[in-house]
Image (tube, rainbow, N blue to C red):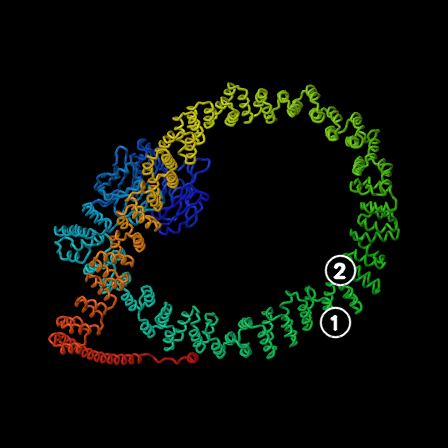
Amino acid sequence: MESEKFICIRETGGNNSVVIVDMSNPTQPLRRPITADSAIMHPSQKILALKAGVQGQGTDSLQVFNLDTKVKMKSHQMSEPVVFWKWISPSKLGLVTASAVYHWSLDGPAEPQKMFDRAANMGAGTQIINYRCSPDEKWLVLVGISAGDPARPQLVKGSMQLYSVEQSRSQSLDAHAAAFGTVTLPGNSQETQLICFAQKTAASGQHGKLHVIELGTKPGQTAFQKKQAELFFPPEFADDFPVSMQISAKYGLVYVVTKLGLLFVYDLETATAVYRSRISPDPIFLACDAPTVGGFYAINRRGQVLLATVNEQQMVPFVSQSLNNLDLALSLAKRGNLPGAEALVGQNFERLFTLGQYKEAAEAAASSPMGALRTRETIERFKAIQAAPGTTSPLLQYFGVLLQKGKLNSLESVELARLVLSQNKKQLLENWMNEDKLECSEELGDMIKATGDADLALKVYMKGQVTQKVVAIFAERGQFEELVKFSSSAGYTPDYMYLMQSLLMSNGQAAAKLAIMIAQQPGPPIEVNALADLFLQRNMIREATSFLLEVLKPNLPEQAMLQTKVLEINLLTFPNVADAILANNMFTHYDRLRVAQLAEKAGLYGRALQHYTDLPDIKRVIANAHAIEPQTLMEFFGTLQPEWTMECLRELLTQNLRMHLQLVVSVAKEYTEQLGLTEVIALLESFKSYEGLFFYLGNFVNSSEDPEVHFKYLEAAASTGQLKEVERITRESNFYDPQKAKQFLMEAKLQDSRPLINVCDRHGFVGDLTHYLYNNQMLRFIEAYVQKVAPAKTPEVVGALLDLECDETFITNLILSVRSLLPVEPLVAEVEKRNRIKLLSGFLDHLVNEGSQDPHVHNALGKIVIDSNNNPEHFLTTNPYYDSLVVGKYCEKRDPTLACVAYKRGQCDDALVECTNKNSLFKAQARYVVERMDPELWAKVLPEDNPHRRSLIDQVVSTALPESKNPEQVSVTVKAFMAAELPNELIELLEKIVLQNSAFSGNPNLQNLLILTAVKTDKSRVMDYITRLDSFDGPAVGEIAVGSELFEEAFAIYKKFDLHVPAVKVLLDNLDSLERAHEYASKVEENDVWSALATSQLDHGLVADAIASYIRAGDSSNHVTVIAKAREAEKYEDLVKFLVMTRKKVKDQLVDSELVFAYAQTNQLGALEEFLAGPNGADVSKVGEQCFQDGNYDAAKVLFTQSSNWAMLASTLVKLNQFQAAVDAARKANSAKTWKEICFACVEEEEFRLAQLCGLSIIVQADELEEVSRFYQDKGRFEELLALLESGLGLERAHMGIFTELGILYAKYREEKLMEHLKLFATRVNIPKLIRICDELEHWPELTFLYMQYDEFDNAALVMMNHSPSAWEHVQFKDVIGKVSNAEMYYKGLAFYLEEHPDLLNDLLNTLTPRLDHTRVVTQMERAGHLPMIKSYLAAVQTANLVAVNDALNNLYIEEEDFEGLRSSVDTYDNFDQIQLALRIEKHELMEFRRIASHIYKKNLRWKQSVELSKKDELYKDAMATAAQSGERELAEELLKFFVEQENKECFAACLYTCYSLIKPDVAVELAWMNGMMEMVMPFIIQFMREYSGKVDALIAERDEAKKEAEDNAKAAEEANSQSAMYAQMLPPALPAPMGAMGG
């Protein structure tokens, strides 16, 4: 909490987040998922600073984010952890590390700037709790706390470091809290910088000190005298200490808050104690200043946010009366503008004024709290003083002081203005106005306006909210716009009708603007229609239009009439304006039919079309299409239904086809999708308008895929003579029906045949085209077609001409005319199909002579050569261009040998094999296959299912291979035989080639092949071949021999080729002969051989032999396996030798670690220590753990000592029973697990002192405390456990678990100490846990106390009632029962007191009065029969006027015959059954009770019963009063007659007086006259006559006044009529209303 604006909470748990509480809206906190170690909010802005530790580096990363803009403002990674940080100003963060203090500015450099180093008293053991800087940032103070005196562990030591930035010096002091403040001393022009700090030490007992010291005295200013005051702590707060200090700038007070919730308030300037109180029952750990209210916020351990501030109404009276410090009270009142010091200020002012110290008196009046002396009387007193010559007037001095102090009030502003204006210094007023020194008022404005300065007066009126005067000035200036704006903002309503009429006479434009402003006001004072009529009456059409257009912009349904009106007046006068209005689409609610009719009359046919809704009207207007803009027509047709559009188009074509055709076509083009393409075509065809069709379809033909559209367009173009378009569409279109188009064009017989040629060429009608052109003698077009249009179609044309038996000369010339453009293959096919291929001889020769290499040309030429038998073999072997497959197929039926020549030339394998098989030409096939050297071809001819395979093999063996001299041919053949799985034939062939002297005897591949073939087919020959052959591949053949399990042959091969390692592997892996292998290794003496042998020995479990072999080989590569095998066989001595050798070659942690372990296992501790003393890479700790697990504790001790593994060292020392050393090791390890192990071991060995040392380090960790406690208790060591926990209370890291566990132990074993423990540490124990324990162990007083501390007052009350002998205490019970949440507890408490403590029942009832249901209490007590016991309680609660309470008390009053109490109860409280009570007591033996019954009857309007009771008891006065109050004439006359009968003249006269208003005069006179009592009735008659004459006089006066008022009203009406007639004569004649308006 950095300020009063925000509280920032960091939540930890499953989802880490930061919660920001805005104190202005605390019910809606802002939650952000942020993982950080610390987060603090900016004092005034939504800027969040985050701090998080960098894992593995021991530093902190700082980041600052703007939460509104979601931008990271700054970030930095510190070089050391930040132990404390806070905002020291709106732009700076203060960062405190373990060694120094830094400032990190948001606006300055990116890195924090170091300010100073921490002093010695702020060392590593000090916890920083605050850091502050002075407002000018010249002084810095750092505050921290540390462990104090062990005798008083709760009282921590406070330390403070004060640092001067200018002097770069520090001063160390003892203090727990400090703050900077300022005061302004009398006579000083500048503020004095102070530091205030509080301290408390163990030596000072219950007293602390508050010091106020000046920092850096400024030259020429009075120095501040150092102040000091005592902080007195009550005995129960002896170990309490200050944790926070705040200085209120508003009141000049110092707030010192202590840890246990005490608040000390001191005056800053005098260090005088003002107030002390406890503000929180829970410890306070955080506080911050609240400058807006002059107090501070604090947060206690329970999470409550507290606000403490000054009670402004009571502060000054408290200081002046309770503290009897008048000077301080006056100072506080002036400083904080507080009430309560008016008398003191007045006395001081009078004293100064009387002494003639006017300046001082002026200052006293100006600074009076709440402006008590800033009155007219004070000004008049200063006015009355005459200034001495040459001196300043006291009045001016007074105003000067006021201006220096701040703003003047209205009275002072007027008086100062009057004084300044009288001296003609108005400029001063303007300056003061700009500085906001004057309070504006109507009187001030009138005064300034009287000087002629309207601008300044207007400014004063506006600032003073003098609305009427502001409007008047605006009206005088004609600034009506400003007038309306101001009136709206001020809520003032001027006379707008008068303003409008005035402007209409002079400035129509201004009137329009004013009208607009009037109409735009919410709830306009003048209706819009009335405003429009004002303009129309003066024929101001343009102004009216401008006004209405602006007003009608919202286009609301209720404005329909006005919309129609503005359109009507413009259609009648300015049609172009109406057209523009309609074009803008401003209105939608006007009378459309009326506007349509007027638009048609005005010639606006387009607007008329837009507004008509009937088809006949539209068809009538559409006849004027020539007068309508085309764009308008196009838009209009888009709004019609498709059927109506077609009707309109038909109407246009019917009236004038030629004139309207273009329009119709344009509309049809635009709205084809709505109208339908087919319907439009049908419409145009119905009028036989091919021209229209051509232009219409021309718009779609390029994008449409409809065949009918394309054909119709083709037909229309042909019909209108558009031959170029016909040619284009036949050439480019892909969608017309080709058959239909061809038929149409053939029938049309156009002069130009190109369209027909396009259709036939594109759609495969070449034959039909040729027939059509040939039959119509159009040979020229045939030549043109094949030469220019489609040379590729020449074969089809030639075929058609041949079918038509055309002259060969024409055909030949036609072919030659195309030449190279002609496709030869289809031409040959067409001619060959008709057996006329020789026709092409000349053409082909011509192409060859021209150098053609086209295979089709040479194929045709070859066919001609073969048919003519003109040396075909020469052609087939020398011509490189023909297609061998095509020509070979052609030759097969004529000469198979020629076919083989052709196939061989083109490597047509399949065709040649098929041909030779078919014609039994196997020798040729064998030669071809051998020469081809193609494995795939061999695979085709050597499969087992080939019936010709044997014949082919015989020819290969006997003819083809013997003839071959190419080794590759032999190799490929051999591989083919192998692939065909012909091993026997292959061996015979290879033996003939390899073993007999031939060109291929020394070929390595053939030797390899021979041996491999023998390996697969005849293994008995392999050894012989190995002996006889020398050129084969030894390693490869050896591997194959091993794979074929020919191990001796493989060993012979490897030995023959000196391959020792493979040879020894064969002996080891395949022959499994370690002896032969060892013998062979000794013979060859190679390291690799020894390594191989060692590996095999290791696999066979011969670890010692294997290690010896590895050492002979000098091989350490397999050290991992050797180590594992040696450990498994426990050959540690051999392993040491091997690892010593290995370590010379390999730098591996495993090697060093295993060597260490081997030393340990062989108990070579000297060698071990020597090895560890040198450089090594062993994992000593891991090896030590292995030794520890194996029980080798001596070696483990050496290893753990070397590796500084204090935890394991401690465990090892425990095993060795070296407990003191184990404790020392555990202290270095500082691990909870280690401490527990040592602690438990010491307990078991009864080393309790060492166990306690260990236990203190364990119990500070809450998770481990329970286990320690359980262990001690299981061992029966209760005293030692209590001593341990009691020692732990004073630890700095003592937590709630320690206090709770100690409380549980006290409850179990030392119950006499439990209550004291709970009272001392109630805020530090886990109350629910202790509640459960105390309940189980029946510690009822302690359980009650815990319930009270936990705010479970219901349970506390139940415990006290259920276990009252030990748990109940009256004062405590009253306090508890008043705080319970269940109301039933109140009545259980009453029952409890009624049973056990009836003497205290009323005391309890008085305590619970505000919370009880009094009716239920009465019922409960009535059932118990003890209602009289609670009479005092009933009397106290009777103010609630409840039925049950009233009845109970009334019954008690009757039983006690307390008529006075009953009378008071009945009169005061009426909520009871009054009639029932009256019936009960009307026959009571005491008259006073009967009188009360009469009184009750009277209250319940039972007048007669009341009077009768009064008459029976001769209470005539009561009877007369009742009769008068009843208002019943009969009852009064009956009572009067009763007195006459009783001859009671005095009561008769008294009744006349009392019931004067009810008794008729005639009745009174009659009774008196008849009974001789006339003298008694005379006063009544006199009173009656006086009243009657007064009423008559009043009636006469009222009649006269009414008559005069009627005459005055008639005269006023006559004058108003005459004035109205005169005003009407001044108005111009009005325009006649529009016809439409009259109809509306």
The N terminus sits in image quarter: top left
Q: Amino acid at mark 2?
A: Pro
**Mark 1 is on which residue type?**
Lys
Q: Which residue is mark 1?
A: 749
Q: Residues within 10 Å of mark 2 (few under 14, many from 20)?
A: many
Which one is in front, 1369 or 1231? 1369
Q: Residue tagged by mark 2?
A: 791
Residue at mark 2 to residue at mark 1: CA–CA distance: 24 Å
Is the residue 1311 above or below the residue 687 in the image?
above
Give the mark nearest the N terminus, 2 or 1: 1
Residue 1372 placed where, x, y %? 29, 44
> From the image, which quarter does the C terminus lie in?
bottom left
Left or right: residue 533 compared with residue 1609? right
- Residue 1224 percent across, percent down from the top left: 42, 25
Crowding at dot 1, Cα within 10 Å, few <14 / some 14-19 / many 20+, comes out as few
| Front one among 986 and 419 | 986
Q: Is residue 1548 left or right of residue 756?
A: left
> Is any part of residue 939 visible from this angle?
yes
Which SS class for mark 2?
A: helix
Q: Position of residue 71 (x, y in %)?
A: 43, 48
Identity of the residue drawn at 45% across and 31% down: 1233
Asked if residue 88 can be seen in this view, the reply is: no
Give the residue at x 29% y 59%. 1443
Count of marks placed on residues: 2
Q: Nearer the viewer, residue 577 or 1321?
A: 1321
Between 4 and 714, the one lying in front of the other is 4
At mark 1, the secondary structure is loop
Q: Is residue 130 left or right of residue 1541?
A: right
> Are the residues tagged 2 and 1 within 8 Å (C-beta)?
no
State the mark number for residue 188: none
